[in-house]
Image (cartoon, rainbow, N blue to C red):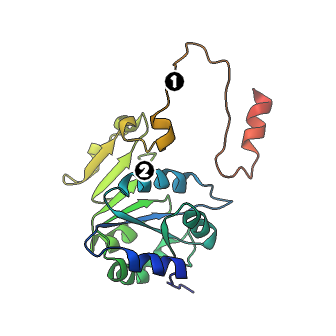
Amino acid sequence: MVRCDCTEEAGMGHKMIEKTRKRIAIRADGNSSLGMGHLMRCLSIAKAAGKKAECVFLVSENEAGNFIKEKGFNCHVLGTDYRRMNEELPLVEELYRRYEFSLLLVDSYQCTQEYLDAWLQYCPVYRMDDTGESHLQSTGLINYNIYAKELNYPVWVKENMQLVLGAEYAPVKEPFLQTTYVVREQAKRIMITMGGSDTLNIAGNLCEKL
């Protein structure tokens, strides 16, 4: 059963948003099974974009919603299954009418072309990508990995689709922007992290192998 409801906090936040200010939707998810990587990088983007626009996160579950609200951002919990994004298709028009988004950023491996097309009827849509394997068409595509320009995106993207590629577009957290660093010829200390979850104990296995 698909439901589309705002929490009280999100509803109050929406009322306080100035109508003249641009509003960006960020569709991403995170939980103990999926991990928190998508949400974390989108939070960095939202913090930077917040200087010029209001960002509203669209998430499937309360676990992600509570995390986003703790970070101080408006969040709309959809009450859907993050693994089946097409469940949200009946909600697209209602969400757009409620928030009047100027742009949508999608960060999910479960995204489909049908989902993107539904939103493209209302606003520009940009998609975060890491692999180049999913040939989905949208207004633009963002891949900030160092290998992004080697993935042959120009071969299959439409002529009017904007490509934002390369490490210069990495969503770095603000504290790290002011940090000095040294590139060493030989690494002596290594940090291993699996982000917000590691249900398969991959970090532990890597430590043992090393």
Counting residues from the N terminus, which is met first, the one under dot 1 or under dot 2?
A: 2
* Residue 61, image x, y percentages: 59, 72
Residue in the foreground of this view, choosing between 143 and 110: 143
Instruction: Name the residue tied to disc 2.
Output: 129
At x 27%, y 64%, the residue is 124
* Residue 194, image x, y percentages: 66, 44
* Discs 1, 2 touching: Cβ within 8 Å: no
Q: For residue 99, which quarter of the picture?
A: bottom left
| In the image, farthest residue toward the left | 159
At x 50%, y 81%, the residue is 6
Q: The C terminus appears in which quarter of the rendering?
A: top right
- Whether residue 183 sits left or right of residue 21 in the image: it is right
* Residue 116, image x, y percentages: 36, 67
Q: Nearer the viewer, mark 1 or mark 2?
A: 1
Instruction: Name the residue tied to disc 1.
Output: 181
SS category of the residue bearing label 1: loop
Q: For residue 169, which quarter of the picture?
A: top left
In the image, residue 87 above or below residue 187: below
At x 61%, y 73%, the residue is 62
